[in-house]
Amino acid sequence: MDIFNYILESINKQLSVYLLIPLLILAGIYFSCRTRFVQFRLFKDAFKTLLQKSEKGKVSSFQSLMISMASRIGVGHIAGITFAIVIGGPGAVFWMWLMAILGSASAFIESTLAQIYKIRDEKGNFRGGPSYYIQKVLNKKWLGILFACLLTAGYAYGFNMLQSYQLSSSLEYYVPNYRHSVYPIIVGTILATVVGLVIWGGTHRIAFVSKYIVPVMSITYMLLAIVITIKNFDKVPGMVALIFKEAFSIRSLLAVPFYRSALLNGIKKGLFSNEAGMGSAPNAAATADVPHPVNQGLAQVISVFIDTMMICSATAFIVLLSGVKLNEGASQVFIVQQAAKMQVGPFGAHVILFAVFSFAFASIIGNYCYAESNVLFIKNDKKVLNVFRATCVLAVFLGAQAGANTVWNFSDIFMALMATVNITVILLIGGIAIKAMNDYTSQRKSGKTPVFKAKNIGLDNTEVWK
């Protein structure tokens, strides 16, 4: 197993340094310029989109956003950000912020494309994502299938095993010698059973669960961070100064080895949390019933903002303001629990436990929703889908027993491969989303409520917008 982990870690480092990070930065800068910084320019419109109602039985823009948020707001917001700070130092937080700002433009492009090229299934529900716009625009079904396989492996198995592991590890705070007890099996069994009940209920049950879990868990976690920040308000200027100072220090930028740098860890964990450009959120964006594709592209800008600038920053503030010891050998969730306990007593650790359970569960079902859409792209067959669901439940069970290094490296590798395929594609076809954006702003300036017709931007290869 040690050799296997060493191989995974080596692959992960090479992909991150030489492929993923350069592409993320390139795409973020390019699309920010091409859209004239749509993430700022149309920010108000993004909020208005969330208030739009959909037809009865359809997934609304808000519900679609909650599905994507359910997947995004996982334990990575607690464990992942803590890991970045432990390995790369406080400067990692700055690079996480910067990548979120730039990456939100990539998120806008990919989600707008997903809306343009979404399809209707046999029940009349919408479905789409990178696999679908790859096939429609590039006419390369094999590339769409490749992306679908990468996403399915990464989300249904890698990320969901990671979420299950982190949920299970949160109990180490309460149970001595937890990993060598029977509790991981019990936790895995309970979690797998509940997940099975939800995913066999279909997309609407997932949307319903996400609609309520995501806001409650996010607000609760944010309130804890606010309380700790107010309690340590005098330390906030020093913390912010430290973040910026460390972000541009020689050690943080050019650490040896480089995979321990603040730059690399901030960007990687930022991507892991907000998924901008990775090609995952478009699968949720495509399910929304909106009058114009740009509406949902803008909604995903809000998602990235909430995800990184609020939830991830909350974790960073809890850890950095508490003065907790950043021990590389400890579970990242345990470190945050200790930090919260130091500030508000045992109650703080209990809130972190609640957040971890909620984040992990919502993320698992959100991840499944992404993967299901891609499995159906590969083979639209009910028997295949049921077998896939069973393997997803098994992965959740096994994740509770897994080792940290294995699941982190496995997840990071597929994240890098997915993002590489998707970013390359949207760099090639992103001009279509730009045309849709111009159509949207043109209608809005004319005093109209923007309604999309594919022919208005010269498209004849869409299914829904004819």
Image (cartoon, helix red, strand yellow):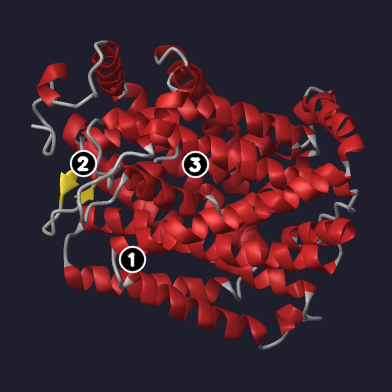
The reply to whether residue 7 is visible in this rendering is no
The reply to whether residue 317 is visible in this rendering is yes
Q: Position of residue 95 (x, y in %)?
A: 67, 30
Q: Quadrant of the C terminus?
A: top left
User: Residue at label 3?
Assistant: 275
Label 1 element class: helix
Binning the other alpha carbons within 10 Å of mark 3 as few (below 14), some (14 to 19) or many (20 upward) gives: many
User: Residue at label 2?
Assistant: 118
Mark nearer the N terminus (1 vs 2): 2
Is residue 106 placed above or below 169 in the rendered structure? Answer: above
User: Residue at label 1?
Assistant: 205
Residue 279, quarter of the rendered image: top left
Question: Please, what is the three-letter code of the amino acid marked with disc 2?
Answer: Lys
Q: Position of residue 126 (x, y in %)?
A: 21, 49
**Dot 2 and dot 3 residues touching (CB under 8 Å):** no
Is residue 224 placed above or below 397 in the rendered structure? Answer: above
Is residue 40 placed above or below 63 in the rendered structure? Answer: above
432 left or right, relative to 270: left
Label 3 element class: loop
Q: Quadrant of the N terminus?
A: bottom right
Q: Residue placed at 74% from the left, 48% from the top?
A: 225
87 left or right, relative to 439: right
Q: Position of residue 253 (x, y in %)?
A: 76, 26
Q: CA distance from mark 1 to mark 2?
A: 20 Å
Q: CA distance from mark 2 to mark 3?
A: 20 Å
Mark nearer the N terminus (3 vs 1): 1
Q: Residue placed at 35% from the left, 76% from the top?
A: 390
Q: Residue placed at 47% from the left, 53% from the top?
A: 71
